[in-house]
Image (tube, rainbow, N blue to C red):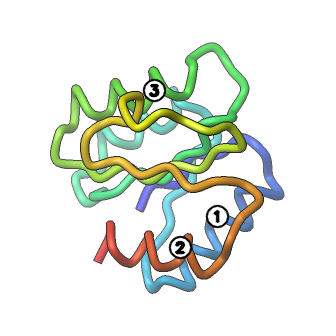
């Protein structure tokens, strides 16, 4: 599972959730880095991204790009903002902050296993 997060502390938490769910985490700290990983790794089936990241690429645009370029990938996202269901890409799920460990681990297991 590709984990995309720019904050090192939040990255550690998200990776912990992924590993607790029984999956391997591949880390990217920017959307650009995540795209480079997706272009070279064929074993990624799920992207777990923070929609609140900083940077040149808006995170919702980033996940929409993933949906366009890699349609089979599942999208699991976290955000402190509320998102209208119409804004969420197909086969995507947004989980709120603060993190609910049990809910996130269950979602990871549903999407990735």
113 shown above or below 32: below
> Would you say the residues marked 2 and 1 are in contact, meaning their CB atoms lie under 8 Å apart?
yes
Tell me which numbered mark, 2 or 3, is placed earlier along the sequence: 2
Find numbered disc 2 in the image and state the secondary structure of the residue it sits on.
helix
Picture quadrant of residue 110? bottom left
Q: Residues within 10 Å of mark 2 (few under 14, many from 20)?
A: many
Q: Residues within 10 Å of mark 3 (few under 14, many from 20)?
A: some
Find numbered disc 1 in the image and state the secondary structure of the residue it sits on.
helix
| 65 with respect to 8 (left or right) | left
Image coordinates of residue 42 in percent, x first then y, are 22, 52
Residue 104 got which mark?
Answer: none
Out of 75 and 39, give the one closest to the viewer.
75
The residue lying at 27 percent from left, 58 percent from top is: 45
Q: CA distance from mark 3 to mark 1?
A: 18 Å
Image coordinates of residue 20 in percent, x first then y, are 56, 85
Tell me which numbered mark, 3 or 1, is placed earlier along the sequence: 1
Given the current orientation, which residue lies at the most extreme right position? 9
The residue lying at 34 percent from left, 24 percent from top is: 65
Residue to which mark 1 is pinned? 14
Out of 96 and 21, give the one closest to the viewer.
96
Picture quadrant of residue 64? top left
Q: CA distance from mark 2 to mark 1?
A: 6 Å
Image coordinates of residue 19 in percent, x first then y, are 54, 80
Residue to which mark 3 is pinned? 62
Q: Quadrant of the C terminus?
A: bottom left
Residue to which mark 2 is pinned? 18
Q: CA distance from mark 2 to mark 3?
A: 21 Å
């Amino acid at each position: 599972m590709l984990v995309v997060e720019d904050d090192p502390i939040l990255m550690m938490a998200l990776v912990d959730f992924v590993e607790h769910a029984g999956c391997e985490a591949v880390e990217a700290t920017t959307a650009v880095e995540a795209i480079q990983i997706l272009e070279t790794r064929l074993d990624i089936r799920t992207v777990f991204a923070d929609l609140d990241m900083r940077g040149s690429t808006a995170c919702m645009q980033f996940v929409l790009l993933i949906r366009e370029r890699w349609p089979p990938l599942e999208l699991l996202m976290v955000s402190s903002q509320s998102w209208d269901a119409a804004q969420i890409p197909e086969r995507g799920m947004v989980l709120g902050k603060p993190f609910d460990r049990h809910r996130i681990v269950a979602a990871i297991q549903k999407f990735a296993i």
